[in-house]
Image (cartoon, rainbow, N blue to C red):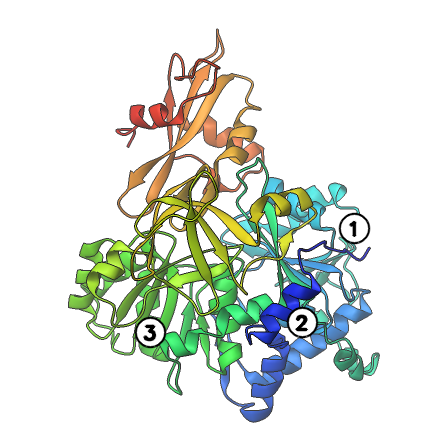
Amino acid sequence: MTTTFETRLTPDLVRHYTDAGYWTDRVITDFLDEHAGATPDATAFVDSRRSITFGELKQEADRCALGLLELGVGPGDVVSFQLPNWIEWIVLHLAVTRIGAVNNPLIPIYRDREVGFMMELVGSKLVVVPREFRGYDYPGMVERVRPQLPDLEHVLVVDRPAGAASSDGAASTDGTLDWDEFLATPWEERRDPAELAALRPDPNDVTLVIFTSGTTGEPKGVLHTHNTLVAANNPLPQRLGIDADTVFHMASTLAHLTGFLYGARLGIQNGRPCVLQDVWDATRFCELVEEHRVSYTSAATPFLHDLLQTAASTDRDLSSLRLFCCMGAPIPRVMVRRAQELLPGMTVLGGWGQTENALVTLGIPGDPEAKIVETDGYPWPGMSIRVVGPDGQPRAATEEGALQVEGPFVTVGYAHRPQLTEQAFHDGWFDTGDLATIDEDGYVKIVGRTKDIIIRGGENIPVAYVENILYEHPDIESLAVVGIPDPRLQEQAVLVCQMRDGTEPLTLESLRAFLGEKGVAKQYWPEHVRVVDALPRTASGKIQKFKVRDTVKDAR
C-alpha cells in the first residue's frame, strides 16, 4: 500500500519560499550525481567497516534503487531502516530517495514498543535492520512486532550469517533477505536503469518521516520534503565555511535530524568526505581526527565534555579540528574556556533546533564568549523567530515568552495526525513548546520548556509516553517522571511513585525488568526510583510536578 501523507503545503507557500530562493528544487541525489561525475574517486564516507568514493556510492545506490523497484517498492512507499552509522545507511537513503519512496530512519536504541508503533503508523512496506548491533537481535524484534504490521512485505538484514539466505536475492527460509546478496544481484539486467531518471521525485514531495519524542503520549512522525531538507543545509558553508580540506564527522545517530542533515547529507551536498562513528568513544574519535584530518563535527554537549576529558591526556594530533557545533544542551562557560586551552584551533558554537525545524539558530564564529555560553545562537538565513505572550502577541526584546519559528526548514506536518499539525501552527508560525528570550542583537536563549520532556545527553525523553507505560504496572497507584540535573548529561530521569496498598516498594531492578518486558528502549528508562506515600496535587487532583521535582533534588 502506498502511503499518502497530508501536509500543510499550499501553492502560495511553495511559491513564497521558491521565489525567495530558499527552495531550489534540488534533491539529494542531484548532488550525488554531480559529485560522482566530477570527482568519482574522491572519498565520500568512511565508517568502522569500510570507505566508499562518490562514484562507488552512486553505483551502489542506483543498484539498490533498482532492487527496491524489483521488490515492488515504488514512489510514496515507506521504507524503514534501523541501522547504525554505517555506509549501508547512506546507500539505502539515497536509493529510497532516487525512486521517490519515503525514508523512515529509526534510532537503533528503539525496541519493540517504539518500532512497532512507528512502523504501523507510517505503513512501512520494507524494513532494513542489522543482524546484530551492540548485542541486540534486530531481526528477532521485527519478527515479534510483524503481526501488527500488515503493510510490511520485506525484511532486509545487513550481515546475515553466511549461507542463511538463498541465491539470486531471494528470501531465506525465515522470510528475510540478505543485504549483501541483494546489493550484489545485477538488477540492471532485469530493469532498465533509465527508470531511475524518470522517477526523480517532485522536490515538494514528502521524502522523510522521522520521529520525535511525543509529549502527548505517543511519538510524532515529522514530515519533511526534499526542499525543506536541502534548504536546511544550504546556509552552512557561508556561515561556517567549507573548503577543499573540510572533513566532516558524525557520531550522533543518523536517525536523529542532526545526524541525518549534518552526517548523512551535508558532505554529499558539498562534495566533501564524512567519517561516521557508530559507537561514541572519545578516544576513538581522537584517533579518527588524526587519521582522517577531521575538521568539523556536530553533537550534543556531553560529547564535547568527553572530548575535552580525553584531549587533556591524548598524544593524538587534533590540530585539524576546527569546529564543534553543540546542540541539545547549554554549553557551560568552563567548558568553552577549557576547549580554548586544550584545542585553541577549534571553535565551539552552540545551536538550537528541533526535529520539526532543523537547526534554527547557531552561534557565529568570532562571537564573544558571552554570546556562546549565554545564548543559543543567531537564526540561519530565512529562519525567523519570535516570542509571544499568552495573548499571542510578540514580546519585546529580552522579555520571556513562548518561542515560535517560521521559515523554509519547518516541517510540513505530522504523519497521519492532521489535528496535531493544525494545533502546532498559528498564523504560519510553528509553536516550538519552548520558552525563550531574544536579545537586542537577535540571539535567542532557551529558558524553559512548556512541553513535559527531559533532555538527557541531547536525547529528548518523552515523559508522557514513559508515564503511560509505567501506569500499566499493576503495583503502582500513581506516579510522575521528572528530571534532575546531571553535570554531564544535563538531566537524568527519576520515577516518583505511590504504591498500591499491600504491595512491595518498587526497586530500580524491578523497574528495569518491567520496562524490558514491555520492550521500551533503555534510553527511556529512569535512572532513579523514589517511592512516596503520596504525590503532591492541586485542589482538582492534578499532580504538581514542580513540587515533585523539589522532593527529588538529592535523588542521585
Residue at left offset 56%, top offset 36%: 216
Tell me, for residue 289, which label it has, or none.
3
Q: Is residue 335 visible?
A: yes
Q: Residue at x 48, y 11 (%)?
A: 503
> Please, what secondary structure does the residue beneath circle 2 have?
loop
Between the C-alphas of marks 1 and 2, the distance is 26 Å
Q: Are marks 3 and 1 in contact (CB under 8 Å)?
A: no
**What is the x, y in percent for residue 186?**
76, 80
Look at the numbered disc 3 and give the secondary structure of its residue.
Answer: helix
SS under mark 1 = loop
Q: Residue at x 45, y 36 (%)?
A: 452
Whether residue 354 sits left or right of residue 10 in the image: it is left
Q: Say what amino acid the circle numbered 1 marks.
A: Asp
Left or right, 394 with reference to 84? left
Q: According to the image, label 2 marks what residue?
A: 203
Corner quadrant of residue 539: top left
Residue 396 position within the rendered picture, expressed as x and y whole percent measured from the top left: 34, 50
User: Which-is-in-front pick, marks 3 and 2?
Assistant: 2
Image quadrant where residue 368 sits: bottom left
- The relative height of residue 151 versus residue 336 in the rendered view (above or below) is above
Type of the residue with mark 2: Pro
Q: Nearer the viewer, residue 18 or 109?
A: 18
Using the image, tell me which numbered label, if any, was put on residue 151. 1
